[in-house]
């Protein structure tokens, strides 16, 4: 069974940086797309950044130029480098992975709080 675990969240001041990690275990073969989502209190979950197995990336407009997604296919890990963080980036960040067979998996989330 595939399990995703996020880490790296925490409290940071506006303008600061954090690096989130998502580690997938129990994977046989490689994963297709991996995506970071976030959900702020009272809001719907939204896609933040995604990356395919061959490295094609896409970003939400709100994070372009500040966030960078990357992955290590050998380790089945995905990262999200977040710079110049803003209070509106405060949310629980979730990792999603989609297998080549079309199954999707979710992590439990990691809290990111941007506040002075």
Image (spheres, rainbow, N blue to C red):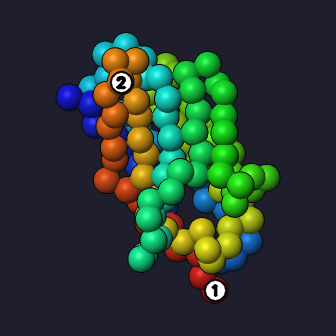
Q: In this picture, is 94 found above or below 71?
A: below
* The furthest residue to the front: 44
- Residue under label 1: 116
- Residue under label 2: 102
Q: Name the residue: 49% across, 34% down.
A: 34
Q: In this picture, is 56 found above or below 79?
A: above
Is there any visible trace of residue 43 in the rendered image? yes
Tell me residue 79's x, y (percent).
Answer: 56, 42
Say what secondary structure mark 2 lies in: loop
Say what secondary structure mark 1 lies in: loop
Q: Could you say which is closer to the camera, residue 29 or residue 75?
A: 29
Foreground: disc 2 or disc 1: 2
* The furthest residue to the right: 65
Using the image, tell me which numbered label, if any, was put on residue 16: none
* The furthest residue to the bottom: 116
Task: For the residues labelled 2 and 1, say whether their Cβ atoms are less than 8 Å apart.
Answer: no
Is there any visible trace of residue 8 in the rendered image? no
Question: Quarter of the image holding residue 96?
Answer: top left
Q: Specify few, some or many for label 2: CA neighbours under 10 Å numbering under 14, 14-19, or 20 or more.
A: few
Question: Quarter of the image holding residue 109?
Answer: bottom left
State how far apart marks 2 and 1 are (Cα): 41 Å
Q: Is residue 26 left or right of residue 49?
A: left
Which of the marked residues, 2 or 1, is nearer the chain's N terminus? Answer: 2
Tell me residue 33's x, y (percent).
Answer: 49, 29
Tell me residue 47's x, y (percent).
Answer: 53, 51
* The furthest residue to the left: 1
Q: Name the residue: 59% across, 33% down.
A: 51
Q: Name the residue: 71% across, 55% down.
A: 61
Q: In this picture, is 71 found above or below 22?
A: above
């Amino acid at each position: 069974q595939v399990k995703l675990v996020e880490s790296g969240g925490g409290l940071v001041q506006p303008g600061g940086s954090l690096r989130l990690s998502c580690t997938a275990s129990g994977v046989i073969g490689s994963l297709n797309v991996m995506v970071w989502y976030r959900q702020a209190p009272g809001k719907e979950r939204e896609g933040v950044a995604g990356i395919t197995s061959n490295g094609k990336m896409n970003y939400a407009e709100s994070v372009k130029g500040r966030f960078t997604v990357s992955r290590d296919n050998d380790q089945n890990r995905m990262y999200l480098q977040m710079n110049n963080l803003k209070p509106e980036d405060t949310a629980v960040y979730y990792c999603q992975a989609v297998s080549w067979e079309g199954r999707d998996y979710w992590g439990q989330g990691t809290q990111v709080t941007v506040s002075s």
